[in-house]
Amino acid sequence: MKNIINIGIPSKGRLRKDVLKIFSKRKLKLISERGERDLIGSIQKKTNIKILYLHAREIIERLGDGSLDVGFSGFDLFKESEINIQNKISVVKKLNFGNANLVVAIPDPWIDVQTIADLEEIAFEFRDKKKKRLRVATKYPNLTSEFLFSKGVTQFRLVDSLGATEAYPFTGSSELITDISSSGETLRANNLRILKDGKILKSQACIFTSKKNNKKKGLKNLIRLLSK
């Protein structure tokens, strides 16, 4: 089906709810045969549009390979993806929801560490005294290493976070973390604080399109409608 327009919508969470509001405000009625659990849907009276409910990270991947034409996801996930994927995607519009920052956070007891420069010092101490590198738990390895290297912090090792990243320093799995945070409340509740200059990236929800399929029939009008 060459002229079907595939739209990726986050399958769960706050982002999903906010994206669905965009459609309802524009009188685009989304239909799913099995209700909220359905991974595939459509728009009433628009036979050329297919809705796919996917993980926000997968939406970026699929825009990159062209299997989605339009997608809603976070700017953080876009910037975390490989450069060759980013090059195949256009940011059409930054939306006014999903606002959060990717930040470097450390356990409260580390009183001497307030800035990235302090972190660098501790990292060398760790290397010299404990013969090991500082471990940073994260779901954002690319952005994290890029940021730390750019600030002169080189003595660290990334730990892939598979669940609640904020628990890692307290289970002995890492010394510090980088995580996405909107208000900082979750971090504070978990006895973590953000370094004074520890903001890696400002993020928000965006409408993205795949550059590969931008000539598809009806796509320009649809994007115009969703972006206004």
Image (cartoon, rainbow, N blue to C red):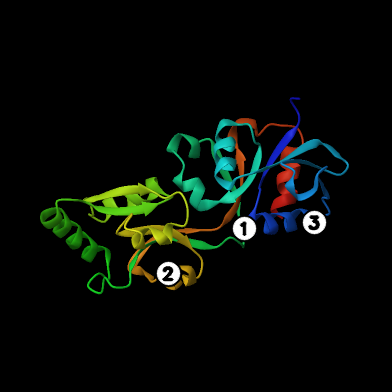
Disc 2 designates what residue?
190
Q: Between 69 and 50, which is closer to the camera in this rendering?
A: 50
> Which residue is pictured at 74% across the width and 25% down the height?
2
Q: Position of residue 10 (x, y in %)?
A: 64, 49
Residue type at mark 3 is Ser
**Tag in front: 2 or 1:** 2
| Residue 24, numbered label | 3
> Which residue is pictured at 48% across the width and 68% down the height?
186
Task: Tell me: 87 left or right of 49.
Answer: left
Residue that protrudes farthest toward the front in the picture: 171
> Which residue is pictured at 27% across the width and 68% down the height?
115
Disc 3 vs disc 2: Cβ atoms closer than 8 Å? no
Is 85 above or below relative to 93? above
> Which residue is pictured at 32% across the width and 72% down the height?
108
Is 100 above or below relative to 38? below
Task: Tell me: 148 left or right of 2.
Answer: left
Q: Which of marks 1 and 2 precedes in the sequence? A: 1
Q: Which of marks 2 and 3 precedes in the sequence? A: 3
Residue type at mark 2 is Asn
Q: Position of residue 138 (x, y in %)?
A: 40, 52
Disc 1 designates what residue?
95
Q: Position of residue 182 (x, y in %)?
A: 51, 66
The quadrant of the picture occupied by the N terminus is top right
Residue type at mark 1 is Leu
- Where disc 1 sits, the SS reads loop
Disc 3 vs disc 1: Cβ atoms closer than 8 Å? no
| Neighbours of disc 2 within 10 Å: few (<14), some (14-19), many (20+) | some
